[in-house]
Image (cartoon, rainbow, N blue to C red):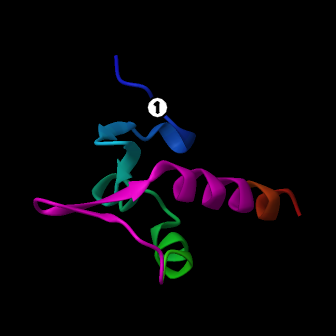
């Protein structure tokens, strides 16, 4: 069983980093909000997809959860 992070996304392991796939984030209803917030951030270029660093994804999720509580 793969490890998962916020919103049930699978955590993938790269060389020296963990990441989630942008194609998995696209399936979530707030993809557009995430995409705007990710502008200017670095990511991994994979074959046909992007790897979003786990720390960036988790920071976004923490912010999103705080906003949903308002």
Give the quadrant of the N terminus. top left
| Residue plotted at (79% across, 65% down) | 67
Quarter occupied by residue 69: bottom right
Q: Is residue 16 left or right of residue 4?
A: left
| Residue plotted at (46% across, 75% down) | 35
Magenta stretch in the rendered image: 40-64
Where residue 11 appears, as percent x and y from the top left, is 39, 37
Q: Is residue 43 left or right of residue 57?
A: left
Any part of residue 27 in sight:
no
Instruction: Mark 1: give few (<14), some (14-19) or many (20+) Cα within 10 Å.
Output: few
Front position in the image: 18 or 70: 18
Front position in the image: 45 or 10: 45
Please tell me whether residue 50 is drawn above or below residue 42 in the rendered image: above
Where residue 31 appears, as percent x and y from the top left, is 46, 68
Give the quadrant of the C terminus. bottom right
Q: Residue furthest top?
A: 1
Please tell me whether residue 52 is drawn above or below residue 33 in the rendered image: above
| Residue plotted at (36% across, 42% down) | 16
**Judging from the image, what secondary structure is the residue with disc 1 in?**
loop
Residue beneath label 1, please? 4
Give the number of callouts: 1
Where residue 7 appears, as percent x and y from the top left, is 53, 43
Q: Is residue 8 left or right of residue 20?
A: right
| Residue plotted at (39% across, 44% down) | 17
Front position in the image: 63 or 27: 63
Please tell me whether residue 45 is drawn above or below residue 21 in the rendered image: below
Q: Residue furthest right?
A: 70
Q: Is residue 62 magenta?
A: yes
Front position in the image: 4 or 55: 55
Q: Is residue 63 magenta?
A: yes
């Amino acid at each position: 069983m793969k490890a998962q992070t916020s919103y049930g996304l699978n955590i993938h392991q790269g060389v020296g980093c963990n990441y989630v796939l942008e194609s998995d984030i696209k399936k979530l209803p707030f993809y557009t909000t995430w995409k705007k917030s990710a502008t200017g951030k670095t990511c991994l270029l994979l074959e046909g997809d992007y790897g979003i660093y786990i720390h960036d994804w988790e920071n976004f999720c923490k912010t999103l959860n705080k906003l949903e509580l308002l």
